[in-house]
């Protein structure tokens, strides 16, 4: 059993650690985590019996190292660990705007790297992750990484040039969907429903709709049309949302997200 290490354990890192541990992919002896504020990881350690340590210990003892830190911290952290990592260690980078080449350049030597873009539903084993493998990754490495990411959701291998698209459609999109869900609940509350019930109705409708698309393979427009009866209530809602620019707002928001991701990659 290989040891997995996380340097950084904020919202995304914690979601991934919890997903891996809930799936029993490794035991607590093979999960080691560091964070700038280790006291925040006390509960995580108590629940999953994983090791809470420092960056140097993660580097020395881990076969697969996740850099779950902010992009601006990469150079500082890599300078701390570059002479400590195992010779065959696999470095997983989940930061927006940081490429496989960037990581190799920061280490100033040949290292095996993976550019990954997961999302926070990893916490409930429903993540959608993209993987782009750097030079030197063997087939065994690819299988190990895919097994980790599949332990908390689904993953797909993509060309690294598509990571900006991945960021907007899955990496950042839970935020958009929570905004939509909250607005739907507000609409139900306006009609007299209790807010706690409104969140459940809206969330389950969102889950069911997504599952319909994935399992039927039908075009989303076709599935939408199935709900829109002639002169009915749903088509009235759809018409008003089109008038208010729902689709345009989403597309333009995603364009802004992509532009920001591209800006970060140039720094």
Image: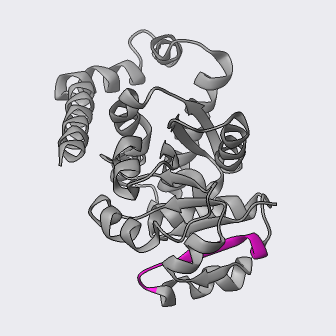
Q: Is residue 34 magenta?
A: yes
Q: Is residue 45 magenta?
A: no
In x, y percent, where is residue 92? 52, 52
As displayed, is residue 224 above or below residue 137? above
Residue in the picture at 22% in, 31% down: 255
Q: Is residue 21 left or right of residue 53?
A: right
Residue in the picture at 62% in, 25% down: 214
The front one of 195 and 78 is 78
In x, y percent, where is residue 51? 67, 81
In x, y percent, where is residue 180? 36, 44
Q: Is residue 158 left or right of residue 175?
A: right
Instruction: Classify residue 166 by image quadrant.
Output: top left
> So how many labels did they put on this image?
0
- What residue span does the magenta drawing correspond to? 28-37
As displayed, is residue 196 above or below residue 35? above
Residue in the picture at 41% in, 82% down: 36
Q: Is residue 125 left or right of residue 257?
A: right
């Amino acid at each position: 059993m290989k040891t997995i290490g996380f340097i950084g354990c904020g919202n995304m890192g914690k979601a991934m650690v919890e997903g891996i541990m809930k799936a029993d992919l490794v035991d607590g002896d093979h999960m080691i985590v560091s964070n700038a504020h280790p006291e925040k990881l006390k509960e995580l350690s108590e629940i999953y019996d994983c090791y809470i340590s420092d960056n140097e210990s993660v580097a020395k003892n881990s076969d697969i190292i996740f850099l779950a830190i902010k992009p601006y911290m990469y150079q500082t952290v890599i300078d701390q660990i570059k002479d400590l990592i195992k010779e065959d260690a696999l470095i997983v980078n989940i930061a927006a705007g940081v490429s496989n080449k960037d990581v190799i350049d920061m280490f100033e030597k040949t290292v095996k790297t993976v550019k990954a873009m997961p999302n926070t539903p990893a916490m409930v084993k429903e993540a959608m992750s993209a993987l782009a493998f750097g030079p030197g990754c063997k087939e065994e490495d690819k299988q190990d990484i895919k097994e980790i990411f599949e332990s908390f959701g689904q993953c797909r291998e993509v060309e690294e040039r598509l990571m900006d698209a991945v960021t907007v459609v899955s990496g950042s999109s839970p935020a958009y969907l929570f905004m939509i869900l909250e607005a739907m609940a507000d609409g139900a509350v306006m009609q007299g429903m209790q807010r706690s019930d409104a969140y459940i109705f809206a969330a389950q409708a969102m889950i069911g709709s997504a599952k319909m698309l994935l399992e039927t393979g039908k075009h989303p427009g076709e599935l939408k049309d199935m709900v829109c009866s002639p002169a009915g209530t749903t088509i009235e809602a759809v018409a008003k949302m089109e008038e208010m620019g729902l689709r345009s707002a989403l597309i333009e928001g995603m364009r802004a997200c992509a532009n920001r991701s591209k800006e970060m990659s140039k720094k």
